[in-house]
């Protein structure tokens, strides 16, 4: 079992391995929000930890809506659960985002524990205290920083994931490798739920995020590096109305970021982006003009906003966050589409 500790601004443990439920210590009332796709594991959590109040929800981006948020709040309020309640959240990243925001706002804030059941939730969504919801206008436009009391990643739950979902979550770990300059995190080709290397690999990826969020918990500076690949990735998700999975969108976004870095005189990291896409084998993108993405990138209706900052990889472990002239973005976008076409990732 891998054990990590977050020290600031709120100390909490992160456990990754098998048998993590035996490590959980709870006092007072408790309630459970869970993704119905992992109901068997959620019921195990409820039994082991003595949770009477349970609400199952459909996972995916549809969980991160104002309607489902209201449903979860009413679930707690109807049972008269007090402020010393601990909310247990079992599921993938959308459930931990939702559940964390419910905990942040019910009675102005209650404790919560995260039990991530996807690779994406383990390495990214459940760590760092970001919680929130989507609006029709874009992803994560509503939210709060609210830190869990603990993160307990039971690796047995990952063995039920479809192979594509398992891989997509590791895109974030690959991203952490680029940010930290850690080549071990770029070695994803042999990873599988049964691989004995997985536990240490996930812990290594989480450690990168922990180190950054401890220094900048409220995203005032360095934490923005974690958005590498996400500016374009989130726009692709929104444009496709989430038909494109998050992991695939970020993988495409990482390749675009590599094109931006090359345009600005940095090391050419596009081969790394292509290596990730070949391993992930995502659905090819339709041809999307840049103008179609502008509503999701920030705009004044005619051009890219000058206040938009891009996270740009200039070399492994060397990144910048800066506004980029529209002409450079457009040239990089055209080069990105040419690369995708040449390697079969863009539909004719």
Image: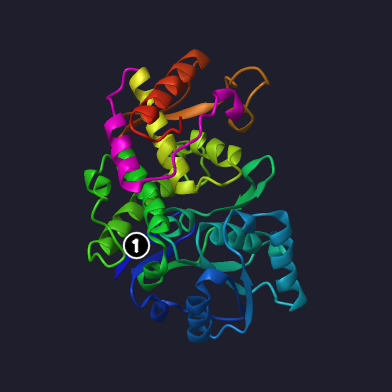
Expressed as whole percent of the image width and height from the top left, the position of residue 31 reads: 61, 76
From what the image shows, is residue 166 above or below residue 265?
below
Quarter residue 2 falls in: bottom left
**Residue picked out by circle 1:** 4
Q: Quadrant of residue 94?
A: bottom right
- Which residue corresponds to the image point at 34% horizontal and 39% vertical from the top-left? 179
Rate crowding at label 1 as few (under 14), some (14 to 19) or many (20 or more) other CA atoms within 10 Å: some
Say whether residue 197 is left or right of residue 287: left
At x 40% / y 55%, what residue is drawn? 164
Determine the residue positioned at 41% across, 60% down.
122
- Judge left or right: residue 153 versus residue 78: left
Q: What element does badge 1 sit on?
A: strand
Q: Identify the colour scheme used.
A: rainbow
Is residue 255 shown to the viewer in this render?
yes
The region drawn magenta spans: 264-293
Residue 268 colored magenta?
Answer: yes
Quarter that holds the N terminus: bottom left
Q: Residue furthest top?
A: 327
Magenta span includes 337: no
Q: Position of residue 136 (x, y in %)?
A: 69, 44
Q: How many marks?
A: 1
In this view of the protein, can residue 211 be seen by the observer?
A: no
Q: Position of residue 310 (x, y in %)?
A: 47, 28
Write the residue at 37% across / 73% down: 156
Q: At which x and y percent is residue 50?
A: 54, 86
Q: Would residue 323 be found to the left or right of residue 316 on screen?
A: right
Q: Is residue 26 depicted above or below 326 in this figure?
A: below
17 lies above or below 67? below
């Amino acid at each position: 079992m891998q054990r990590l500790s977050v020290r600031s601004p709120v100390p909490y443990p992160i456990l990754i391995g098998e048998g993590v439920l035996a490590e959980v210590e709870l006092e007072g009332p408790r309630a459970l929000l869970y993704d119905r796709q992992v109901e068997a594991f959620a019921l195990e959590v409820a039994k082991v930890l003595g949770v009477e109040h349970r609400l199952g929800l459909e996972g995916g981006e549809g969980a991160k809506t104002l309607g489902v948020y209201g449903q979860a709040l009413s679930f707690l309020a109807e049972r008269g659960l007090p402020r010393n309640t601990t909310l247990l959240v079992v599921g993938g990243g959308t459930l931990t985002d939702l559940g964390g925001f419910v905990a942040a706002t019910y009675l102005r804030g209650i404790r919560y524990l995260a039990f991530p059941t996807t690779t994406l939730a383990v390495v990214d969504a459940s760590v760092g205290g970001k919680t929130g919801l989507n609006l029709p206008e874009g992803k994560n436009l509503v939210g709060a920083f609210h830190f869990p009391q603990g993160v307990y990643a039971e690796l047995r739950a990952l063995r039920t994931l479809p192979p594509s979902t398992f891989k997509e979550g590791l895109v974030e770990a690959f991203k952490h490798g680029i940010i930290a300059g850690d080549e071990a995190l770029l070695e994803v080709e042999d990873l599988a739920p049964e691989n004995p290397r997985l536990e240490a690999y996930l812990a290594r990826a989480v450690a990168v995020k922990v180190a950054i969020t401890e220094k900048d918990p409220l995203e005032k500076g360095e934490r923005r590096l974690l958005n590498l690949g996400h500016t374009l990735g989130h726009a692709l998700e929104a444009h496709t109305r989430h038909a494109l999975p998050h992991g695939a969108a970020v993988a495409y976004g990482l390749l675009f970021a590599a094109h931006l870095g090359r345009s600005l005189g940095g090391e050419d990291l596009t081969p790394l982006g292509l290596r990730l896409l070949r391993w992930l084998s995502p659905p090819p993108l339709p041809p999307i003009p840049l103008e179609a993405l502008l509503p999701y990138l920030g705009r004044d209706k005619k051009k890219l906003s000058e206040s938009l900052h891009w996270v740009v990889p200039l070399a492994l472990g060397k990144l910048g966050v800066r506004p980029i002239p529209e002409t450079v973005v457009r040239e990089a976008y055209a080069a990105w589409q040419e690369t995708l076409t040449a390697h079969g990732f863009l539909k004719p």
